[in-house]
Image (cartoon, rainbow, N blue to C red):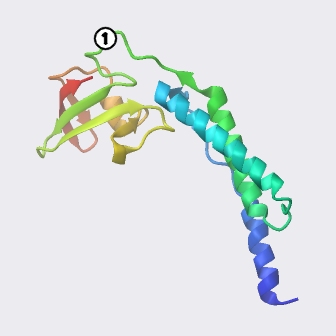
Amino acid sequence: MSVAFTREQDLEATAADLPDRPISQHPNLVTREGLAALDEALAAARAAYAAAQASGDIQTDRTAMARATRDLRYYAARRATAELVEPTHDPDVAAFGSTVTFDREDGRRQTFRIVGEDEADPAKGSVSYVSPLARALIGKRAGDAATLPNGEVEIVAVG
């Protein structure tokens, strides 16, 4: 038996012991879009798990099975704890699900939607409701100022 073959098996065994994806201790608040995304991710995880089982070669490719199992556990737990939050009755006040536009002290104007942790993607304009930015914005109206760790922002619009 070659050393390379043995080492490959060792790497495969290590990969098969993937740690669980961390699950936040915060309530799992979601928007309607976030709930739909969780449903899609759970369906994809179930499909990946079924595909890994169907390959019939679980002993050889334990990484695919471990990854599929880990993702299935994560998305099943997140879907089971998801709490749908409907838009607030006062659209002028920043809240979960709101889109908030603000000006920074350096002149930049930014817009973010406040969403659940699993649906947050700052590069695409959404931040988690537990982020420092969202926490500073929640409860504010257009014209209000919000203090962030790195400065102050002025809210321009809430939608």
Task: Please indicate whether residue 57 sits to the left or right of residue 93 in the image.
Answer: right
Q: Quadrant of the C terminus?
A: top left
Residue that extends furthest to the bottom in the rendered view of this protein: 2
Answer whether residue 51 is visible to the viewer in this image: yes
- Residue labelled with disc 1: 90
* On screen, residue 33 above or below 69: above
The type of residue carrying mark 1 is Asp
Residue that extends furthest to the top in the rendered view of this protein: 89
Numbered-mark total: 1
Task: Please indicate whether residue 28 sits to the left or right of residue 74 in the image.
Answer: left
| Circle 1 SS class | loop
The picture places residue 43, in percent across and down from the top left corner, at 66, 39
Task: Please indicate whether residue 56 sits to the left or right of residue 42 in the image.
Answer: right
Residue at point 75% right, 56% down? 66
Q: Please tell me which residue lies in front, 26 or 21.
A: 21
The picture places residue 152, in percent across and down from the top left corner, at 19, 37
Task: Please indicate whether residue 59 sits to the left or right of residue 137 in the image.
Answer: right
Residue at point 50% right, 27% down? 30
Mark 1 crowdedness (10 Å alpha carbons): few <14, some 14-19, many ≥20: few
The picture places residue 136, in percent across and down from the top left corner, at 31, 30
Q: Please tell me which residue lies in front, 99 or 155.
A: 99
The picture places residue 148, in percent across and down from the top left corner, at 27, 38
* On screen, residue 149 above or below 54: above
Residue 91 in which image quadrant: top left
Answer whether residue 31 is visible to the viewer in this image: no
Residue that extends furthest to the right in the rendered view of this protein: 1
Residue 139 in which image quadrant: top left
Q: Quadrant of the N terminus?
A: bottom right
Residue at point 68% right, 35% down? 76
